[in-house]
Amino acid sequence: MAVEVNQCLLSWDEWRREVLEERVSLFEREVIENGELNEIKVEARVVEKQHKDPEEREDPDEKLRRENSILGPSTSKERKEEEDESKKLTNEKEAAASQTTQEEEFQDHHKKFQKKKPTDDDDDDEEAEHLMDEEADSNDEDVVKIYCKDDYHTDIFRNLTEFRDSSLLTDLTLRTEDRGSFHVHSPVLAAVSSHIQEVHRVILAVCSDYFRGMFTLGMRESHQPCVTLPFLFASELEVLIDSSYTGALPLSWKYVFEITSTALQLHQFQKVACTSKFKDLPAKQLLKYLNSRSLYVPSELVLFRAVVAWIQAKPKLRLKFAKDLMKTIHFSLMTSKEFKEVQSLKMWSDHSLAKLYKAVFEDFCSNESQCRTYLPKESLVLIGGDQNSGDSRSISRELWFGNSLRNYKWGEKAMEWRKLGEMPEPERFSHEVAVLKGQLYVFGGNKYYGISDSMNSVYRYDPFQNNWESLAEMQQKRYSFSVVVLDGKIYAIGGHSDNEYIESVECFCPTGNSWNFMWPLDLPLGGHVANVSQGRIFVSGGLSSHHQFLSSMFLYHPETGSTYLANMAKPRACHCMETLGECLYVAGGFTAADDMSFVDQLACEVYNPVDDSWTAFTPLPVPHVGAGGAVLEGKFYVLGGYSQENHRDTKLVHRYDPTTQNWENMGKMPGPNNDIRATVLYLPPQFRL
């Protein structure tokens, strides 16, 4: 009887162990509690050994002795039964018996066990152990446990990689200029592009948020089954795609520099040129960078130093490239101080470079008009506005964009402007603009100079389709107001309406094409500026309904209203305020003098939200009242405007560089410049060529 009970107990334990193993087969074994951990680990090792190559299997006797040492002492009868059971299991595995047969054997044993009742001859220890097992099972059924698989995400992406390799469920084909073709899942590229950029900030700056923008901002490519990427070769794109699916970049420095050509050519060139790996660039690749119009350098001396460092790394092999490399440098744009450094170079003592030095010197002395042209990734765009036209003023529907920045001799700079098109009628000024998901929105404004000439019309421009769309009108007519984008919605804040100041705020939902009123401002306000920083709406300055110039700065929340912050040192209205980093920069506008006359506000201030404080920075060189403001590549642009003191147009663009803390003259405006609006927009290549 004891033998039958023991056999049934073993079968019951075996069944319970198999159920537990099946339940946690995908999770960590160490979550099993109640004294069962060692038993399951031993049994798991037995099964694992039985699946190995026969030559590597453990000797059954040795296995049994090891199990006994772990499970504790037992009777000779029990050991014999266990040994028989072990041999039986081994024979069944070697005979490749099916799982069905094992389940049938278990059911037979289990039925016998249910028919048998424990007798007084049963071993007390075995009965106690059985009762503990039943209690453990009961407790295990009542306890809810959450199992986690540490490599779950890895497995998911491994499966996605297999899908990609098999072109399974791929929805996009990417082609390169050398006719390479890759089938990918667009959601994968869109989801991981920003994370890759954060992890490999320098290495993958070329694709920073590129695919995310392509597939989520309503661009034309998001609807195309095949997209051509003319700036990448097949070998380069393959590495980028692989890194998107695996998170790994197995790159040599050769491919690092190839893939990051755009990053190098933008703002990283000066930094990368100082690294030792820069000197390993092939001559052909270096020439490609130096001849690119996407190359940005603060001066020609930076290029000269980089070329010299590259040559001197292997002078015997690279001196022959000196002539071609020096041709990419505009020595005529250097100052006399900069060229003295060129002349002091010991490399010129090599007689083979005598003719090259003569050519370099002649280039420096040349009076020919030369410039270095740089194409930013995004473009400054000017919308509407008005201007002086002889004895009268004219209002505009024009859109202009800055295609390139040009550096001339003696540090002179200019913006190359191109006409983008015209917005739908009528012409407008004192309006507002916003960019959301790569599309340009234009709101309200004045169509003429009368009291009742304000508008509430709204239009949206898609640069990739090059078309305009009329949207739902604002619920109130507005001009001299402000607009911000927050959490996918657009807020129109305050302003004038038919010559009255208003405090209302409206929210536009692009998906529903509808407007809703939000919590109003504390007072009617016009000529103010709102901007978003770190997910919060800041509003500065403006004019109250009593024509009082304000120095206030407050946070506006659409659901709860205004929270006031530290005041500016100078009150102002019709100014510019832009976010740079964590701070907000304020420039331009006008204010009232002590005698209540209007004066131009040249003083500039920067607000730090962390300590709620204002700090003065370099004042503007000329008045900019009603100017357009924007930030491009980390620099604050103030575009156009006029002087309130003499009513003359300011037809200049000024740029503030926080690193040098100076304003730079960036040349003239292309057309309208008063009560104009500016923004930054990504334009398709066909506009930039």
Image: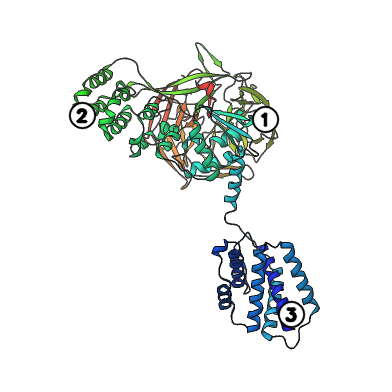
Measured as percent of width and height from the top left, residue 51 is found at: 60, 62
Query: Nearer the observer, disc 1 or disc 2?
Result: 2
Q: Amino acid at mark 1?
A: Gln
Q: N-terminal of the two: label 1 or label 2?
A: 2
Question: Mark 1 Cα within 10 Å, few/some/many (few <14, many 20+)?
Answer: many
Can residue 494 be seen here? The reply is no
Side of 270 where 47 appears, left or right: right
- Which is more N-terminal, label 1 or label 3? 3
Q: Which quarter of the rendered picture does the N terminus lie within?
A: bottom right
Q: Position of residue 123 (x, y in %)?
A: 69, 85
Q: Is residue 645 above or below residue 634?
A: above
The one nearer the camera, 159 or 554, is 159
Separation (CA) of disc 3 from disc 2:
102 Å
Circle 1 residue: 476
Q: Residue at x 54, y 64 (%)?
A: 56
| Residue identified by numbered label 2 | 344
User: Mark 1 falls on what kind of element?
Assistant: loop
**Mark 3 vs mark 1, CA separation in Å:** 90 Å
SS class of the residue under badge 3? Answer: helix
Q: Nearer the viewer, residue 496 or 350?
A: 350
Badge 2 element: loop
- As displayed, is residue 430 above or below residue 518? above
